């Protein structure tokens, strides 16, 4: 681990063009292979969770799997008054004839008139799997548009899972494009501020973007093992830009410090090798921590989280490889170019004024000029900035008080987490910027019984088909007068008589208590009292409401396992990196504190309505069921970036013989600038996702931005140094490396002190 980054940097800096060309060939190969092989999107079967998923599998066994369904809604055009029934019927016949002629359509149901007479609808069932509908819905939408043009006195519009899915994808794509337009320039400006050099600011951006491109290609290949649920590219963009820039930033900052410390006595290749021995190792450890932490998401047994884990792991490892291979080559070439530029300036200065040759040579030191990499100024020595010094002053004087105040503040931010309410973000939570969602609202207003559905699926011997059908009819009679249900019941049986399904309409959105309570009573009372009494019958309930309820429940069941594995992984990685059990425990506690505080802030903002206008969203009174788990895992991984980088600097100083107190303050001070810069980049990227229309992505972006801010400016600058100052030498337990370094330093200093005392005496005698 210690020698690998150095060996790679030595070869890369010594063979820069091979490394640079090799890297971009690698990226092109990854992307090309991914495009050639293609991705493997998740299927309907991959999304099945809990009892709802089991019921869907039973229905599919009987040939009654979910199919893509579109509904054409015909109503009066705005401002025209009451619906013309004759014209509406004509439009319904027109749309039915057109749809039946399409190869994408399986069947067209008879037109249905709304109870209040304000609308007519035509249900169109498409061929293929449920998730494939959005790929083939365009011809249906085109026919609907033609019917609308032929009947200007009506409003003819189409909605369904395929058209909504297509609208969501388009909105997500537009949002991501806008996010990139915001995140990339702000990141570049931040890097320009940090390095004062265009070339040095472009290097992190170039490597991050190329890492993202390579990761996209590799993720397509990986999807054949872990199917892509459609979120892989989003995760790669979200994580890739953040870690790609961060890892490069860590390396670059250390390279500049080593160059300034060398004072022109070392070649660019030697300076790069020195940086690799320190920050290169930290980058490898950080990348492994993010990858291993992300891998715990596979324990969720959920295709969405598997897709997230795959994207995060692939892009992180590719970013690490770029920092260890092509980055040293770029730094070496930039250093050589800066030296040549400085040498030309020195020669020009000598020709202009030969009498001042020696003086100009002293003033124009090529190696010193090279340290600025074309910035036009020498690189300042590393150390704490004014703000960091001001913050560390009370920390160093009153570590106990600082620790107590900071921890209490973080716990106060985490307190709202006790009121966390998790729900699956149903279809009704999608942004109304999607045209299909506006139609969805009008459809539900005209046909409230379509808001949701229960599906009771029963598998039994074919000889009991009549008995099962009788029990399901009895169930339908029992629920007929239940106000939580729509009163509409449809019974279907498979051709072989083994699978039966009863569909019950629910005139309430899936998130309402009426819909949820009807599901509970259906599963706990209605079903056991009827089909539950059929000998040998296997029953399960699915449908919109069941899917909505079962997914968060599944996450709650998996959460303890994943959090436990995450804590163990974080502890083990820290102990392995620093040979300290104490620092392993500190890392776990601080990560929990950071994640808890950011989730508390998320609850305050998104479960209430006070921030709706500020962040442009409509509160659902809940948090998306995927958000906390995603936040915990990704934050634990990203926090290890700062943890590894900061503690590496502290341990490095302690191993050189510096007392722990001074090592802590110097390590925090010297790393604060790069941690702050990295945090600004990450916050910029994550905050740009908070501007998305999709509520769950908005919550993820917001919570990650808050978490990084708290981690960088409270955990790493206030709580971590305070805690380490109080622990003192116990920080390194049970490792004896720091103690041995102290004894070695003391033994080496003894003869020097003795020589210092005898030298004056001998001089006087002489």
Image (tube, grey):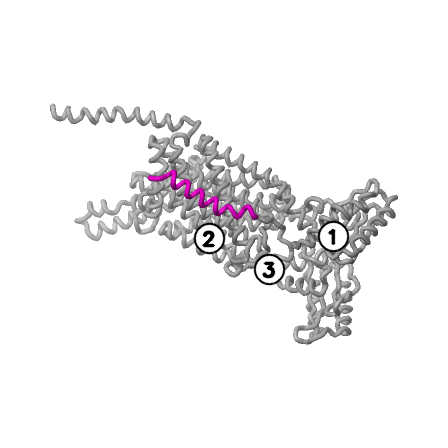
Mark 2 lies on residue: 684
Q: Mark 1 and mark 3: span between their CA atoms?
A: 25 Å
Left or right for 419, reference 519: left
| Magenta stretch, residue numbers | 397-419
Verify CB contact (< 8 Å) between mark 3 and mark 2. no
Spot occupied by residue 353 in the image (x, y as percentages of width and height)? 19, 51
Q: Crowdedness of circle 3 by 10 Å Cα count: few (<14), some, many (20+)?
A: many
Q: Mark 3 and mark 2: span between their CA atoms?
A: 23 Å
Instruction: Name the quarter where the C terminus is drawn.
Output: top left
What element does badge 3 sit on? loop
Q: Which one is in front, 382 or 111?
A: 111
Query: Which label lies toward us, 3 or 2?
Result: 3
Q: Which one is in front, 24 or 178?
A: 178
From this viewpoint, is residue 422 visible? yes
Q: Which image quarter: residue 69?
A: bottom right
Q: Mark 1 and mark 2: span between their CA atoms?
A: 43 Å
Mark 1 lies on residue: 454
Residue 581 on the magenta span: no
Q: Residue at x 11, y 23 (%)?
A: 765
Going from the N terminus, do you reach mark 1 or mark 3 first? 3
What element does badge 1 sit on? strand
Query: Which label lies toward us, 1 or 3?
Result: 1
- Quick check: 368 above or below 618? above
Mark 3 lies on residue: 431
What element does badge 2 sit on? helix
Going from the N terminus, do you reach mark 3 or mark 2 first? 3
Query: Which label lies toward us, 1 or 2?
Result: 1
Going from the N terminus, do you reach mark 1 or mark 2 first? 1
Verify CB contact (< 8 Å) between mark 1 and mark 3. no
From this viewpoint, is residue 30 visible? no
């Amino acid at each position: 681990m210690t020698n690998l980054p150095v060996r790679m940097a030595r070869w890369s800096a010594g063979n820069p063009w091979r490394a640079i060309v090799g890297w971009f060939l690698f990226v092109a190969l990854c992307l090309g292979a991914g495009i050639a092989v293609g991705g493997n999107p998740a299927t309907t079967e991959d999304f099945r969770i809990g009892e709802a998923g089991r019921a869907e599998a039973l229905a599919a066994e009987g040939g009654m799997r979910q199919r893509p369904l579109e509904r054409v809604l015909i109503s009066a055009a705005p401002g025209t008054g009451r619906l013309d029934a004759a014209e509406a019927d004509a439009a319904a016949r027109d749309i039915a004839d057109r749809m039946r002629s399409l190869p994408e359509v399986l069947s067209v149901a008879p037109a249905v008139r709304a109870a209040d007479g304000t609308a007519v609808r035509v249900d169109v069932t498409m061929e293929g799997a449920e998730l494939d509908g959005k790929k083939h819905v365009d011809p249906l939408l085109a026919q609907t548009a033609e019917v609308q043009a032929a009947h200007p006195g009506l409003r003819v519009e189409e909605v369904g899972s395929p058209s909504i899915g297509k609208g969501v994808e388009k909105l997500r794509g537009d949002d991501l494009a806008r996010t990139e337009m915001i995140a990339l320039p702000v990141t570049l400006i931040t890097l320009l501020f940090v390095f004062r050099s265009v070339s040095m600011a472009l290097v992190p951006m170039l490597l991050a973007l190329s890492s993202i491109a390579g990761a996209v290609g590799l993720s397509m290949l990986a999807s054949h093992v872990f199917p892509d649920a459609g979120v892989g590219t989003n995760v790669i963009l979200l994580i890739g830009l953040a870690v790609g820039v961060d890892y490069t930033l860590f390396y670059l900052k250390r390279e500049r410090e080593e160059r300034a410390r060398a004072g022109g006595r070392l070649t660019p290749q030697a300076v790069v090798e020195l940086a690799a021995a320190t920050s290169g190792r930290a980058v490898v450890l950080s990348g492994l921590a993010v990858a291993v932490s992300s891998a715990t998401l596979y324990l969720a047994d959920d295709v969405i989280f598997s897709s997230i884990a795959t994207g995060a792991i692939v892009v992180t490892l590719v970013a690490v490889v770029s920092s260890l291979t092509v980055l040293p080559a770029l730094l070496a070439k930039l250093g050589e170019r800066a030296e040549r530029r400085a040498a030309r300036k020195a020669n020009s200065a000598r020709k202009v004024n030969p009498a001042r040759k020696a003086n100009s040579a002293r003033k124009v030191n090529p190696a010193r000029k090279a340290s600025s990499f074309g910035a036009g100024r020498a690189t300042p020595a590393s150390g704490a900035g004014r703000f960091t010094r001001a913050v560390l002053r009370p920390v160093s004087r009153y570590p106990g008080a600082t620790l107590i105040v900071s921890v209490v503040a973080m716990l106060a931010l985490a307190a709202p987490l006790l009121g966390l309410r998790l729900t699956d973000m149903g279809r009704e939570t999608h942004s109304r910027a999607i045209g299909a969602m506006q139609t969805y609202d009008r459809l539900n207003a005209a046909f409230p019984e379509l808001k949701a559905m229960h599906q009771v699926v029963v598998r039994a011997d074919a000889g009991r088909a009549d008995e099962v059908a009788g029990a399901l009819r009895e169930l339908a009679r029992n629920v007929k007068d239940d106000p939580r249900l729509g009163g509409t019941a449809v019974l279907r049986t498979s051709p072989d008589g083994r699978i039966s399904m009863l569909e019950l309409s629910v005139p309430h959105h899936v998130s309402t208590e009426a819909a949820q309570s009807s599901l509970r009573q259906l599963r706990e009372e209605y079903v056991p009292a009827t089909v539950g009494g059929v000998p040998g019958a296997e029953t399960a309930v699915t449908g919109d409401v069941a899917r909505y309820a079962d997914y968060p429940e599944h996450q709650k069941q998996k959460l303890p396992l994943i959090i436990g594995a995450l804590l163990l992984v974080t502890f083990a990685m820290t102990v392995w990196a620093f040979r300290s059990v104490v620092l392993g425990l500190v890392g776990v506690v601080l990560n929990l504190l950071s994640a808890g505080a950011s989730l508390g802030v998320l609850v305050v903002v998104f479960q209430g309505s006070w921030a709706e206008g500020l962040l442009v969203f409509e509160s659902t009174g809940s948090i998306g069921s995927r958000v906390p788990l995603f936040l915990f895992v990704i934050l634990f991984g990203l926090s290890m970036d700062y943890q590894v980088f900061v503690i590496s600097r502290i341990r490095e100083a302690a191993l050189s013989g510096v007392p722990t107190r001074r090592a802590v303050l110097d390590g925090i001070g010297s790393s604060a600038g790069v941690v702050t810069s990295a945090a600004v980049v990450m916050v910029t990227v994550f905050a740009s996702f908070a501007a998305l229309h999709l509520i769950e992505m908005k919550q993820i972006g917001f919570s990650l931005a808050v978490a990084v801010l708290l981690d960088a400016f409270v955990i790493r600058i206030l709580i971590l140094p305070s805690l380490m100052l109080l622990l003192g030498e116990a920080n390194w337990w049970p490792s004896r490396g720091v103690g041995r370094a102290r004894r070695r330093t003391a033994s080496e200093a003894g003869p020097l002190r003795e020589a210092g005392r005898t030298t004056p005496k001998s001089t006087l005698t002489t």
